[in-house]
Amino acid sequence: MRTGDQVVQDLPWRWNVQGKIFIIGGLGYMFDAWDVALNGFLTPLLGTEFDLGTGERGLVATANLVGMAVGAVVWGTIADRIGRKRAFSITLMIFALFSVLGALSPTWEIFLVLRFLAGVGLGGCIPVDYAIVSEFSPRKQRGRVLAAMDGWWPIGTTLAGVSATLLVPVDGNWRWMLALMVLPALLLFWVRRGVPESPLFLARTGREEEARVVIDDMVRRTGATPEPYSIPAVAPASTRSRLRGVSAVAEQLKLVWAFSPKITGVAWALFITVMVVYYAALSWMPSILRAQGMGEVAAFGSTTVMNAVGILGVITSVLLVETLGRKWVIGIAAPLAALSLIVFSLVIESPTAAIVMIAVFGFFALVVIPVMYAYVSELYPTELRASGFGWASSSSRAVTGFVPLVFGTVLWPVLGLPLTFTLMGVLVVGAVVFMAFCAPETKGRELDRITGTEEELDTQVVEKA
């Protein structure tokens, strides 16, 4: 007899069932992207309004990204303990509230505090989004679904770029850019109604009756043939399950590394190196282009091109993720994204060539990031999925949080753009090589059975043939 989670992962895809969860999760993710992309547009505008130096401008993005690091850890842990649905709504509420309050900031210092707090909510959205979408998705389509989740990211960043460009001539433009973040608050009410709790989470936490209600409803709504299934018994609650606060977060980190040091090492290495490159470009590209003599509208517009082309990158990742596999897509696209920034820095004196390379970077960055997110969310078992993803995300936020500051005060002024981007590219290649030798391919495998042997994988495939 099969288990309930196996039944869920072999259901046919239906847009009114799994697709609804994908869209609701994706819309929240879209507003996450909108908010993160705003950092690059806010940096030069706040620098002008508050007369900030280069280092102080870097703190605009740093405050938000460090808040995301805290949020990813805290909310990833909470989601693995109280459930995906509740964390899903609360994180969006925190993010929306403090984004709107940020628009009312009377001083730069208050603005930084509010951007940090918005980041706490924002950082929690991504690991929770990916956990709940992955746990509802059929395994045959899971790679494409999780990669397609990142399609909402370039939509969000493009909307941020378009709105920022249009608002440049308006008085108090940066305040209006942030005020638009009230939209996620409206989305929150829809999210609460539309998303059931993850049946995999319910089963793993001993809530068998609730799990069966969700599973049976999904079987009925997808038109699958009903079959008997078991919900494995859960061991009695351990001391770990009773821990709260900082102790719970620390214990979850210990469990993430105890599960597999190699897998966690690969997850952290990929997140840190790839996201350092991406956030360095996202946070500083408008300022780099302005330093080359472009006006604000032209610089913002060129950065928007980078984000818009990312939509094509996500489409490409969706097409390749189940064909080539997660590791091959990451292994090829990540180094090419880093290389495109190196070439950009070498042709920056030519505006046309520079914009072309910005677009190339936007394409490859949004090929690798969706697949990387899908890959890392699949590597961990259900009881560690949100926190494992959250800690990997947090490790990158903790590093990338200071990249805008270090980039603007040390790397760009001292090393120059070519050497800075080359250094970042070398780190990306190192992470890819580490992944190639120390982490498994996840294509076609059932969640919670990812780290099985090749013989076990063959058995899974034969059973479904």
Image (cartoon, rainbow, N blue to C red):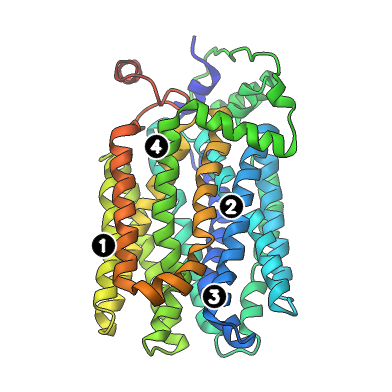
Residue farthest to the top, as pictured: 1
Label 3 sits on residue: 55
Of the two numbered discs 1 and 4 on the same chain, state the one appearing first in sequence. 4
Q: Which of the two discs, 3 and 2, sits closer to the camera?
A: 3
Q: Residues within 10 Å of mark 1 (few under 14, many from 20)?
A: many
Amino acid of disc 2 = Ala
The label nearer to you, 1 versus 4, is 1
Q: Is residue 316 visible?
A: no
Does the residue at mark 1 contact the one at mark 3 (Cβ under 8 Å)?
A: no
Pointer 2 and pointer 4: residues touching (CB < 8 Å)?
no
Left or right, 313 with reference to 225: left
- The amino acid type of the residue labelled 3 equals Gly
**Based on the displayed image, in which of its 4 quarters is residue 81 positioned?**
top right
The picture places residue 303, in percent across and down from the top left corner, at 41, 75
- Give the residue type that dot 4 points to: Gln
Q: Which residue is mark 4?
A: 141
Which residue is denoted by mark 2 in the rendering?
A: 69
Answer with the quarter of the image where residue 80 lies: top right
Looking at the image, residue 27 lies above or below residue 202? below
Q: CA distance from mark 1 to mark 4?
A: 31 Å
In the image shown, does 234 or 414 lie closer to the viewer?
Answer: 414
Residue at label 1? 339
Marks 2 and 1, the one that precedes in the sequence: 2
Question: Residue 77 placed where, x, y %?
Answer: 64, 38
